[in-house]
Amino acid sequence: MKDVVIASACRTAIGAFGGTLKDLHAAKIASVAMQAAVKRAGIDPAVIDDVRFGCCLEPVDTMNVTRIAALLAGIPDTVTAATIN
């Protein structure tokens, strides 16, 4: 059995409603946070087994924003990813 660890954590920017982040897709914003978390942890994305990401208002055009964000962040497509509401 593998040990489960949280290697790093990072949050997205906080903006005002209708502010400068309004034109960015949630997956793009999330991918920036994921890239920062991987960089802070100093790990190769290939060693990640699972990604969990919180999103309170998941976009209607994306079934699993965490999956899309992980792929945009360079995390391999073999890694599972789930959005936590």
Image: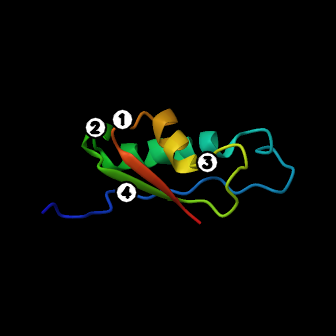
The residue that disc 1 covers is 76
Rounded to the nearest whole Å, what is the CA distance between mark 2 and mark 4?
15 Å
Judge from the rendering whether residue 56 lies leftward or rightward of residue 22; answer left or right.
left
**Label 4: how many residues lie within 10 Å, few (<14), some (14-19) or many (20+)?**
some
Q: Amino acid at mark 2?
A: Ala
Judge from the rendering whether residue 6 lies leftward or rightward of residue 63; answer left or right.
left
Where 16 falls versus 70 (above or below)? below
Provide residue 22's location: percent of width, then percent of height: 80, 45
Check residue 46 in the rendering and tell me which mark sits there, or answer none: 2
Q: Quadrant of residue 85?
A: bottom right
Rounded to the nearest whole Å, what is the CA distance between mark 3 and mark 1?
18 Å
Q: Residue furthest right?
A: 18
The residue that disc 4 covers is 8
Provide residue 5's location: percent of width, then percent of height: 27, 63
SS type, badge 4:
loop
Residues at marks 2 and 3 touching, judged by CB atoms closer than 8 Å: no
Q: Earlier in the sequence, mark 4 or mark 1?
A: 4
SS type, badge 1:
loop
Q: Amino acid at mark 3?
A: Met
Rounded to the nearest whole Å, what is the CA distance between mark 4 and mark 1?
17 Å
